[in-house]
Amino acid sequence: MAEHLASIFGTEKDRVNCPFYFKIGACRHGDRCSRLHNRPTISPTLLLSNMYQRPDMITPGVDAQGQPIDPRRIQEHFEDFYEDIFEELGKFGEIESLNVCDNLADHMIGNVYVQFREEDQAAAALQALQGRFYSGRPIIADFSPVTDFREATCRQFEENNCNRGGYCNFMHVKVIGRELRRKLFGRYRRFKRSRSRSRSASPRHKRDREFRDRDRDRDRDDHRDRNGRRPDRSDRDSGGRRKHGSPRRSRSPPPAREGSEERRARIEQWNREREEKVCSQLLDFCQNYSQVSYQIRHSISPLVRQMHFSIEMP
């Protein structure tokens, strides 16, 4: 039963927990949902609800005055917002992914998901965001159960054929330019590369490697054979190899193998000895048993005669 519940947790077959909240951290029913929303107490992912305000919030592609907006201007506005958020939240730790929803539904519009490398980094960012504002609006931040964005994003949107458009229940993630991505996320790759390079070239590691080589040479010099004798180093060169033409120690020849007849005779002798041992043990047991029974019989017989005598008296 427990295995079945674990296998259907967070799926459509789960009638207790909300699958959409488990996958995308948001539900269109909100608190009125008939299923449970298990809000995590700690997570590497933060959800900033409805934080990003598009220039064409009312009508896509049109500003508040009804004038059409150039798509390049919308993209520039989004990348400026993206860079601001990344620079501010990057102060608390390494950011693995930063996703902004392009959906139009009330429960997903403008949602920002930021995933840190460590959970304590996300907790520090959440503590710092409490009571803060962005563009005159309060920041609503909380831990999110989303850790794998492949399950949360809409695959049809990535293929440009989502039929539900902006009201899809899965994430339509806005994409930033290649240059901005290289600028923001490339710093972590450069930091890791420089850190690994400095670690390999540090004098401390060189000194440790010299100590390891010295210990290995000492262990090779202290090596002894199976009889506890140190090998003779006079017939070896500086590299520890045996010199050409040096005599080798003679080894004792291996013992000759027994034939089938000899093995058969040895096995018969073992069986005969075991049978004799078992027979002697059985004989000793019988003798001891007969002695014990004789003693018991002689100790009981006077009592039996006394009982008969007492019964015959009037």
Image (cartoon, helix red, strand yellow):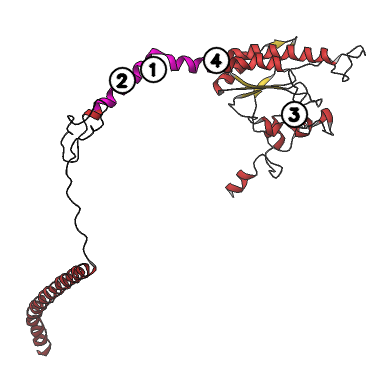
Lateral position of residue 204 relative to residue 262, left or right: right
- If you read the primary sequence from the N terminus, does the residue marked by circle 3 or circle 4 appear first? 3
The residue at which mark 3 appears reads as: 171
Distance of label 3 from label 2 (alpha carbons): 55 Å
Viewer-nearest residue: 55 or 37: 55
Question: Can you say whether 19 is above or below 138 in the image?
Answer: below
Residue at image position (10%, 80%) is: 297
Farthest residue in the front direction? 245
Q: In the rendering, which numbered label is found on residue 205?
A: 1
Viewer-nearest residue: 16 or 52: 52
Residue at image position (19%, 72%) is: 268
SS for dot 2 = helix
Distance of label 1 from label 2 (alpha carbons): 10 Å
At label 3, which amino acid type do we have? Met
Q: Are marks 4 and 2 in contact (CB under 8 Å)?
A: no
The residue at which mark 4 appears reads as: 191
Q: Are marks 1 and 3 in contact (CB under 8 Å)?
A: no
* Residue 129 makes an appearance in the image: no
Question: Can you say whether 301 is above or below 43 in the image?
Answer: below
Residue 143 appears in which quarter of the rendering? top right
- If you read the primary sequence from the N terminus, does the residue marked by circle 4 or circle 1 appear first? 4
At label 4, which amino acid type do we have? Phe
At label 1, which amino acid type do we have? His
Distance of label 1 from label 3 (alpha carbons): 47 Å
Mark 4 vs mark 2, foreground winner is 2
Distance of label 3 from label 4 (alpha carbons): 31 Å
SS for dot 4 = helix
Range drawn in magenta:
191-218
Distance of label 4 from label 1 (alpha carbons): 19 Å
The residue at which mark 2 appears reads as: 211
At label 2, which amino acid type do we have? Phe
Q: Position of residue 215 (x, y in %)?
A: 27, 24
